[in-house]
Image (spheres, rainbow, N blue to C red):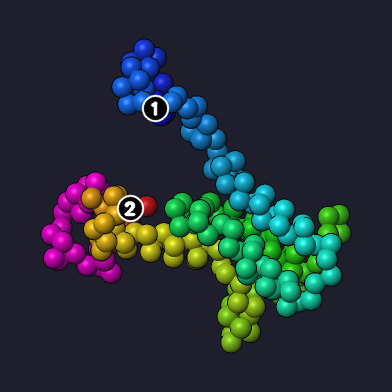
Amino acid sequence: MVCSKNIPEIRAEELQSILEFNNMENNLVSMSKKEIFACIRERVWKKLQGWKEQLLSKAGKEILIKAVAQSIPTYAMGCFKLPEYSCSELKSLASNFWWGQKEGARKIHWVKRSEMCKGKKNGGMGFRDLRTFNMAMLTKQAWRIPHDTNILFTRSRKGDIFRQHHSCVLNWDTDHHIHDRVF
């Protein structure tokens, strides 16, 4: 349980004993977003470093990027809007791995990262555009709120988000303020 600094320590201890919660330090409040999401970057980097020493074909690298490097941040992307620089760093790691860049040696990237994110039918590699994927995951979660009544968040917060609309006349496609309130 984390209590605000504005709550006296005695009151916080009373609440913790009544609710039977342990006291926790709130480490995330003072951290920057870059520090919070650095663990995702580190996990991707470690996975790719483990495979860099192997002699992989382009097909092997493609599978590794799609199945491992781009799947690691999926859960976080479904819950949080990752900062632009975090998505850019993840794309950069995948791109450097693809072109065979090693520490201290720069390799030429013959195709822009944005081109590599295009579908194979359109001349790309089919890699995910992480920024777009992040927004798609968040939009999916936001869509579930008015449509799935079994979600705890829906039951507890639906009145705050949708207080201006009757559920029968709610149109997700045209009511853009809903998207803004959820995010």
- The magenta region covers 156-175
Where is residue 16 drawn, in percent x and y?
A: 36, 22
Position of the N terminus, as image quadrant, is: top left
Q: Nearer the viewer, residue 14 or 29?
A: 14
Where is residue 36 drawn, in percent x and y?
A: 56, 42
Residue plotted at (24% across, 46% down): 156
Vertical arrangement, residue 93 with respect to residue 61, above or below: above
Where is residue 88 drawn, in percent x and y?
A: 62, 58
Residue plotted at (33% across, 17% down): 14
- Label 2: which residue? 182
Asked if residue 174 is among those painted magenta in the image, a careful observer would answer yes
What distance separates the C-alpha of mark 2 from that of mark 1? 29 Å
- Label 1: which residue? 21
Residue plotted at (14% across, 66% down): 169
Vertical arrangement, residue 166 with respect to residue 55, above or below: above
Q: Nearer the viewer, residue 1 or 28?
A: 1
Vertical arrangement, residue 14 with respect to residue 86, above or below: above
Circle 2 crowding by C-alpha within 10 Å: few under 14, some 14–19, many from 20: some
Asked if residue 81 is among those painted magenta in the image, a careful observer would answer no
In-image side of 141 versus 73 (left or right): left
Pair 2/1: label in front: 1
Vertical arrangement, residue 71 with respect to residue 119, above or below: above
